Amino acid sequence: MNTITSGFLRQCAVAFAMLVALTVILGVAYPTVVWAASRIGSNSAEGSQVTDAKGCNAGSSLIGVDPKAPAGTPDSYLHARVLGSADDPMATGDPSASAASNQGPNSETLAHNITARRALIGEREGVAPSAVPADAVTGSGSGLDPQISPEYAAIQIPRIARNSGKSQAAVREIVEAHTSGRQFGFLGQQRVNVLEVNLALGHTVCK
């Protein structure tokens, strides 16, 4: 066997060994490690799903959807922030197509929506429009914020208690139980998870 042939075979052997090694590392070991890491807190890997009292998938703890009471029935839901549109200031966000409104501080549409929302929410909650918190009348960047401020939750407690038959103290206790503090103790603000509160109030998806 001449030198050229011997060198070629050695290169082929090295190339084959590299192919096998990289296949094992990148095709087997790496995907296995990533999959194993995703099983740590596997709920997050599956979309942070939240189930109701009957075990049905009620949504995600990370995606907010403003609930709507069926027509003709008392509204005992805790409401989330809204996305709004030029035609409907109280329009809710669509989880399949989340997006910001792209309305800036000089937008007449945004100013109109904020004024309309203050009036509508104030009437719904029985408070003056000036008492409606800022997060109630403005959307988040995605339009799907799952949380609201404790102040927005607080003005909804009397209506929820009145329409659900629960005492205000009981509703307030549920809200407080699902209120998170600042992240790491100093980042952000306190926040209330809307879906978790509604499930704790007894609302279910299963019929």
Image (cartoon, rainbow, N blue to C red):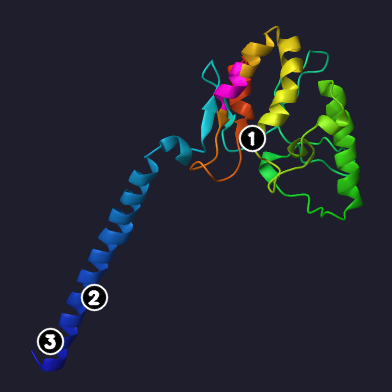
> In which quadrant is the N terminus drawn?
bottom left
Earlier along the polypeptide chain: callout 1 or callout 2? 2
Mark 2–mark 3 CB contact (< 8 Å): no
Nearer the observer, 198 or 19: 198
Callout 2: helix, strand or loop? helix
Q: Where residue 12 sits in the image (x, y, percent)?
A: 21, 78
* Residue at screen point 78% across, 13% down: 74
Establish if 133 lies above or below 3. above
Which amino acid type is marked by label 3? Ser
Q: Where residue 16 sits in the image (x, y, percent)?
A: 22, 71
What secondary structure is the stretch in magenta mostly built from?
A: helix
Tell me which corner region of the image, top left, top right, bottom left or bottom right, holds residue 17.
Answer: bottom left
Residue 165 as seen in the image, left or right of residue 12: right
Q: Which residues are magenta?
A: 173-178
> In which quadrant is the C terminus drawn?
top right
Q: Closer to the camera: disc 2 or disc 3?
A: 2
Nearer the observer, 40 or 173: 173
Please name the residue that numbered disc 2 is placed on.
15
